Amino acid sequence: MTQKDLGYVELEWTCPRCKGRNPGTQATCSTCGAAQPENVNFETPAAQAAVTTDQAKIDRAKAGPDIHCGFCGARNPADAKVCKQCGGDLTQGKAREAGKTVGAYGETDAGAKVKCKACGEENPAAAVTCAKCGAPLGKPAPAAAPAQAAPAPSGLGGGSVLIFVAIGLIVVLGLCAFVFFGFRTSEKTATSTGAHWERSVAIMGMVPVRAQAWQNQLPSNANNVSCRSERRSTSSSPQPGAREVCGTPYTVDTGTGMGRVVQDCEYEVYDDYCSYTTLQWAVVNTVVEKGNDFAPRWPAVNLTGDQKLGTRNETYVCELNDGKNNYTFTMRTQAEYEECLAGSEWKIEVDGFGAVVSAVPVN
């Protein structure tokens, strides 16, 4: 993230003695004459002005935070060596804090008003004393938040609510039943009544497919290319052809009564993102061999010059009966399958849905 300088604006401070508002570069209160204490904060002005063109104020802001004399407390510029008020050595003084964000930057509405608490007179937002009675003025009250519309009635009557509740109960009961029957198992003794197997081989071929990639990543065999500009990355520093995206400007206290207006920016880097046609390996056919014996075979495969073998799959199923119900159980290996001879006995575990979850031959 890059911090972009937009210029400098004068801040203001409020006198703790009389509550009068004063320009940030002024060291004493315009209303009562009191010196600015070192613990008084600079704030954004009630009527934010445009960035200043006053070079003297800009130079002071760049010089560094002001120093409060360690002997009399008077405020002095950063480059002063002795106090302008008492002549004291400023190496014993205290520099004001700097670097704090004091608020968002934006020029105030020219029509903004501030009401005098003493006489009720309305004054321009930039005024520091009442034009009618001379009393110090505070800042304008913040704008009221827009009224929130009352929520619209849902339109659901009592009957509709009951229907939704009933549906919810049915769903919950269904889930409970599924869990109950799915995890409840029973052991049975069953006899093998048969077996069958299936083996398959995928045949791969080169087929045209649509794909997408950045332009500098296109394969050499790309055809029918069409591109569009898209954001590829972001950078914290300017890049050729990048789009600058900045946040809301805000003001940073320089400790001099002046604020530095900055904006956090990043840079969106765009590039051509393309759709194209290319040839890729894909399944073009699958050959299958099946049987109900105990000599599983792979299917015969005849490949052309632009084809190759793909994934092989094999499935072995044992058929069982416990005297009442028929079951099937898929074996993991051919060796297990070869134990499923007709008439062999098995200990099986069956879940509540009638599915065999385990099967072990009885020796």
Image (tube, rainbow, N blue to C red):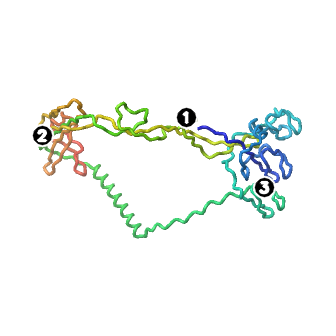
In space, the residues marked 2 and 1 are separated at their CA atoms by 69 Å
Question: Residue at label 3?
Answer: 127
**Disc on res. 240:** 1
**In which quadrant of the rendered view does residue 302 lie?**
top left
From the viewer's perspective, tell me whether residue 231 is left or right of residue 125. Answer: left
Question: Residue at label 2?
Answer: 292
Front position among marks 2 and 3: 3
**In which quadrant of the rendered view does residue 140 lie?**
bottom right
Q: Residue 108: where, in percent of width, then height?
A: 70, 53
- Tell me the residue at 40%/40% (across/down): 226
Closer to us: 360 or 236: 236
Quadrant holding the N terminus? top right
Front position among marks 1 and 3: 1
- Tell me the residue at 16%/34% (across/down): 299
Secondary structure at numbered mark 3: loop
Q: Residue 175: where, in percent of width, then height?
A: 33, 55
Name the kind of residue labelled 1 in the image. Pro
Secondary structure at numbered mark 2: loop
- Tell me the residue at 64%/45% (across/down): 249
**Label 2 crowding class (10 Å Cα cut-off): few <14, some 14-19, many 20+?**
some
Name the kind of residue labelled 2 in the image. Asn
- Tell me the residue at 22%/48% (across/down): 355
Quadrant holding the C terminus? top left
Sequence order check, earlier mark of 2 and 1: 1
- Circles 2 and 3, Cβ within 8 Å, touching? The answer is no
Name the kind of residue labelled 3 in the image. Ala
Secondary structure at numbered mark 1: loop
